[in-house]
Amino acid sequence: MDTALTVDRCPSPPGTVVLALHGDADRDTAPVLARALRRALAVRPAPEALVVDCSGLRLCTSSCLNHLLRARSTAAEAGTVFCLAAPSPALARLLAVTETDTVFDILPARPARPGPAVGGTTAAPAGPAHARARLLAAQAERRTADGDPVPEAAALFRATAARLADAVGPAAEQEQLPGIERLERLREALAALALGLARTHGRPAWILARAADVLSPALHWRALTDDGTTTFGTVVPTPDDLTDAERAVRALHDVLTREAAQHTAAAGIRPRSG
C-alpha cells in the first residue's frame, strides 16, 4: 500500500487557498505537510482564508497535528482564517482524543470545486466572504447555546434575518442591478447586523459580530470612480466581489434563521422554574 502523503493545491477564488491532503500523515511525511502549509501562508498578499481539505487522510498522527496547530497560529497572526474541511475518520478521532476539535474551525463538507453543475452551468466556488459565512454556520451548529435561551434572542435573530432578506434578494435579481445599488444593499445588510448587535449581549452578540465581520470588506468599497480627490483607501469592487458578498448575506440569513428556531425550540421545552 502506498503510504505517501500528497498535498494538492485546488482551484479556488481569489483570496482563498485550498489544500487537499491524500494519504498517510505521519512522522515520515510530516515535512511534506509542513512545507505545503508554509508555502500557502507565505503567499503575498496574505490569503484571507486557508482551507485544508482533510477528507483524503487515511492516517494522521500527532506529528502532523502539531504542524496543523502551528499553521493555525501563523495564520491567526497574519489575519488569515484557517479551517479544516471534512476531517476523515482518522483525523476526527485524533482531534477528539487530543481535545483539539474545539480549537480548530471545522467545515463539515469538502470545499466546493469549480465544475459542471445542474443544467450544464458552471458551479461557482465559495469566495472569501461566502466561505467565512459557511464557516460561521458550521461553528454555530457545533456549539450549543450558553445559558438559558430566551424568546427575545429568537425574535432578534428572526428580525435581523428578515432585514437581510429585504436587503439582498435572489441572485438572478441582484446581479441585474447596477453596481452602485448592489453596494447600497450590502451596506443595508451590514447596518442590519450592526443594529441587531447593538441590542443584545452574550452568545447572540458574538454571532452577530462574527456575521458583521464577514461583510466588513464592504466598508472599504466605493461605487464612484476616483475624481482626483482622496478616496480614503476605498476601492471599487469587482462584480465577483459583489456576488461573493451577496452569497454571504444569504448564508448569514440561513444562520440567523436556524439560530432563531433553536432558541425558540429550546425555550419552549425548558421547564419553567418555580
Image (cartoon, rainbow, N blue to C red):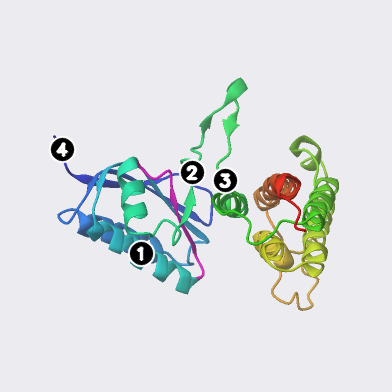
Asked if residue 55 is among those painted magenta in the image, a careful observer would answer no
Occupied quadrant, residue 187: bottom right
Find residue 2 and name its label. Answer: 4
* 4 and 3 marks in contact (CB < 8 Å): no
Q: Earlier in the sequence, mark 4 or mark 2?
A: 4
Above or below, 268 relative to 78: above
Query: Callout 1: few (<14), some (14-19), or many (20+) C-alpha neighbours within 10 Å?
Result: some
Quadrant where the C terminus is found in the figure: bottom right
Residue 190 lies, in percent from the top left, at 77, 60
Q: Which residue is mark 3?
A: 126
Amino acid marked by disc 2: Pro
Q: Is residue 56 visible?
A: no
Q: Look at 81% across and 56% down and name the residue there.
A: 156
Query: Callout 3: few (<14), some (14-19), or many (20+) C-alpha neighbours within 10 Å?
Result: many
Q: Which residue is mark 1?
A: 69
* 1 and 4 marks in contact (CB < 8 Å): no
Q: Distance from label 4 to label 3 (Cα)?
A: 32 Å
Q: Earlier in the sequence, mark 4 or mark 3?
A: 4
Which secondary structure lies at badge 4? Answer: loop
Q: Look at 67% across and 60% down and name the residue there.
A: 207
Q: Nearer the viewer, mark 4 or mark 2?
A: 2
Amino acid marked by disc 4: Asp
Q: Earlier in the sequence, mark 1 or mark 4?
A: 4
Q: Distance from label 4 to label 2 (Cα)?
A: 27 Å
Quadrant where the N terminus is found in the figure: top left
